[in-house]
Amino acid sequence: MAAVLETAALEKHFGGIAAVNGVSLAVEKGARHALIGPNGAGKTTVINLLTGVLRPSAGRILLEGRDITVLEPHKRVGLGLTRTFQINQLFLDLTPVETVGLAISERMGTGAQWWRLVGSRSPVTEEIVEILGRFHLTDVMFERTGNLPYGKQRLLEIALAIACRPQVLLLDEPAAGVPEAERHDILATVAALPADVTVVLIEHDMDLVFSFADRISVLVNGTLLTEGAPDEVARDPRVKAVYLGESLNA
Amino acid sequence: MQPAAVEKVDRYLAGRARWGALEYVFWLLALASIWHGYFHLPERYLILTEIAWLGLFALSLDLILGYAGIISLGHAAFFGLGSYVAALLAKHGIINEPVLALVVAGLAAAVLGFATSFLVLRGSDLARLMVTLGIALIMREIANQIPEVTGGADGLQGVTIAPILGTFAFDIFGHVAYTYCLIVLFVLFLLARRIVHSPFGLSLRAVKGNPLRSSLVGIAVDRRLVAIYTVAAFYAGVAGALLAQTTAFASLDVFSFERSADLLLVLIIGGTGYLYGGLIGAVAFKLIQDSLATFDPQYWQYWIGLLLVFLVLFGRIYGAIIAALIFAVARWLQLSFFECALIMLAIGLGYGHIQKGLKLLDGAIARLVGHARSATPMLAHRKP
């Protein structure tokens, strides 16, 4: 299978610290690829580099063979690369309807139209209703996002990424901070993502990682320690030593 | 698909752009002010005209501040350029017809806005304040340095404005001038209203709320900001041109720092992000300024300053009430300037207690009215 998202010797230095140091990663089309590692390993920095939030100090990023290393973030979205954030990055003053509608009209290329009123295009509306329904947000769709409970905001965080209709979706700890009772909703929606969407997942919850991923990369101190199928990674003594030791033996 | 839900969402989205009853009332009152002035108070036309172009100027700032989150302390740069362009076009007979000249003046300001927009794209609010302030200062100095064009410190004299559309000549009472300003304000308001309720306007609100996430849902953030900054500059240029045309004069103070600063004050009084803030703020600011200047010609700026402080400290409604109470007491007891300052000091020291008291009062009103939301916005306007 061809790699849809690739990095070559990716590096990011903050001052004298190498947060990401020579990461070469290949994510195959349709993969469920988990990126794990201890705190401070550089996982979120990798996502920030992939999505253009940060410029790499060195190395290249390829999306479907195209070099996107220095492409602006919004253009990467246009090419089908989307992400969610570990800490919600939402539009607190907008409602879920507006939030999702915004992403859909940007995707359709109508987001810059100033002469037309919002909501006069029913295909957009239909998709808004469909996505909000899928993410259990229908009952709060007219509420201000800032007033929603955290679990609902977390769902909207993912719904917003889905509304961009990504080819490659990067999920940065989707279930982080979600109360146990609402966790199920998040995990179910992540599991139900379309099979042709490539998903890269950062997650600390090992149950979720091993139930979800078909491929795991382990990042330690900004470098790739190992990569492989879940059972291989789970057996790897180095991985046990640096990261999984406690949780597997517990 | 759930057709009922789709219809609900469609209705909700359409409802956001629908005209509210208060909006009709506002514009009917504006219309009535024309006739009222005509029959009863022709001497009020001067201030009404000032309110109209100030409202348009504030609307311009609201477009970038209230909708895109760009703060500016130099919006007079565009106002001033529009003013001079309109005055020069008329003086040299390049474009005699005022409406056409108005558009050209606005476009000139828009070009300046486009060119300088790239300077305000990045950076913090503080950086933006400094950059915009600097641009206005530069514009003022340029005008000062070319007296053969601008008239320098004496201002541009000898401007005559031709009749509007070749038909409506400006009269000495200012009847035509006010009607003209009001129509221009209304037309540009309609356009602004359209813009903010469009997908483009929605994306601006998103950018204001969270620029990082905006770019990651595919919004070309920089281009949207450049676009609205350019549009706002056009609006400010038109407002400046209205001033030049209705007074047949342009002087260096169109670029002044006070003009930009007063504009922020107007928006703070009226509130940002709902388009009427600038208009209501302009009415309130001019009326307060006018009445204070009559009551207390010596210290009227003191009272404006006091009002501003209280609006920010105690929220729009309570702040205005407290400021009005102090003003009334000071008038009633004939307090001296020094005694007023002592009252201010006392309020400063008791700030925490007053806050607590206001919150209790707010809660009581909320219970009285029956639902919590009605009263909370009163304090919600407070900003750090």
Image (tube, coloured by chain):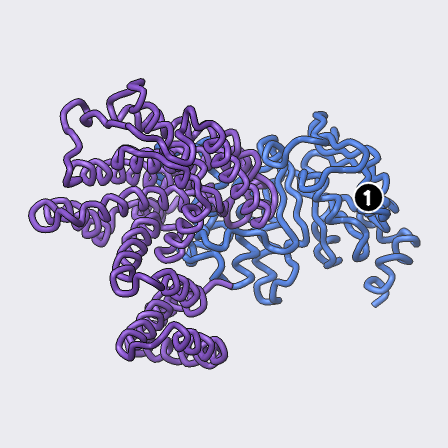
Residue visible at 52% across and 36% down in the picture = B138
Q: Residue furthest left?
A: B39
Residue visible at 53% across and 33% down in the picture = B116
Residue visible at 40% across and 54% down in the picture = B265
**Residue beneath disc 1:** A13
Q: Nearer the viewer, residue B275 or A26?
A: B275
Q: Which chain is blue?
A: A
Residue A34 against residue A179 in the figure, above or below: above
Q: Nearer the viewer, residue A51 or B131?
A: B131
Chain at numbered mark 1: A
Q: Nearer the viewer, residue A226 or B172?
A: B172
Residue A69 occupies quadrant: top right
Q: Which chain is purple?
A: B
Q: Is residue B231 visible?
A: no
Residue B347 against residue A236 in the figure, above or below: below
Q: Position of residue B317 (x, y in %)?
A: 34, 67
Residue B318 occupies quadrant: bottom left
Residue visible at 41% across and 37% down in the picture = B252
Q: Indicate the quadrant containing the N terminus of chain B: top left, top right, bottom left or bottom right.
A: top left
Q: Is residue B115 visible?
A: yes
Q: Position of residue A123 (x, y in %)?
A: 39, 36
Q: Position of residue B127 (x, y in %)?
A: 59, 46
How packed is label 1: few (under 14 Cα within 10 Å), some, or many (20 or more)?
A: few
Relative placement, left or right, of B65 versus B95 is right
Q: Nearer the viewer, residue B363 or B189?
A: B189
Residue B174 occupies quadrant: top left
Task: Name the residue type under label 1.
Answer: His
Q: Secondary structure at mark 1?
A: strand
Relative placement, left or right, of B370 versus A76 is left
